[in-house]
Amino acid sequence: MSTSKENLAETPFQTAGPFLHIGCMPNAIKINKLYQNDLGEIPFNNKNEAELITIKGSIFDGNGIALDDVMLETWQCDEKGEFKEDSGFARFVPNYLTKKFILKTVKPGPFKGYDGKIHSPHISLSISSRGLNMTLNTRIYFEGDELKNDPLLSIINNCNLNSLIAKKTKKNSYLFNIFLQGEKETIFLDI
């Protein structure tokens, strides 16, 4: 049987995987009753809706196609800039149909780093997906915050810093899209 090479070409996101979120996020993809809650489903307990912000977005591959087979993990401090061992971690996946993710969390406050420098409010973000040979790491900063003195942002040159800034869409709501490749590629950190 002869098959055209055109039919067998790999797309940018088919080089590894697939379905890494099945084992890590069973409730999110409707495999219920394995665990009461998926790990990281609620980053901060005992917060009411008024205390939370919502960050929505999509992850796009090199062809500009929104992906759903992606797992995102975030780490952050609370609104006072304090890190607590029992809160601040979230794990989530994009919706299979809409290809959009939603993170409901508190807006982090500025915090003092181990070196004594004040860091602008941000959320650390890790991205795992088929097609990625390693986890990608980046940060989510917030439109309207003071960013020019942030220790990390102040050393990044010749890059699109806007790719790290969540855009405010309405009160307590932000849009943050992630681009894995291309002209709009998000800045990823080598950590």
Image (cartoon, helix red, strand yellow):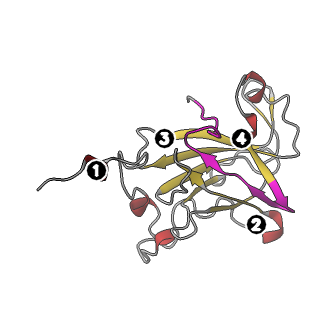
Q: Nearer the viewer, mark 1 or mark 2?
A: 1
Q: Earlier in the sequence, mark 3 or mark 2?
A: 2
The quadrant in which residue 101 appears is bottom right
* Labelled pair 1, 2 in contact (Cβ < 8 Å): no
Q: Would you name the residue on which mark 2 appears?
A: 47
Mark 1 residue element? helix
Mark 2 residue element? loop
Q: Which of 81 and 138 lies nearest the eye of the viewer? A: 138
Q: Would you name the residue on which mark 1 appears?
A: 8
* Labelled pair 3, 2 in contact (Cβ < 8 Å): no
Q: Nearer the viewer, mark 1 or mark 3?
A: 1
Mark 1 Cα shell of 10 Å, populated few (<14), some (14-19), many (≥20): few
Q: Would you name the residue on which mark 3 appears?
A: 135
* Residue 173 in picture, x, y percent from top left: 79, 61
Q: Would you name the residue on which mark 4 appears?
A: 164
Q: Earlier in the sequence, mark 1 or mark 4?
A: 1
Q: Which residues are magenta?
A: 168-189
Q: Earlier in the sequence, mark 4 or mark 2?
A: 2
Q: Amino acid at mark 1?
A: Leu
How many angstroms separate mark 1 from mark 3 (CA)? Answer: 26 Å
How many angstroms separate mark 4 from mark 2 (CA)? Answer: 26 Å
Q: Amino acid at mark 4?
A: Leu
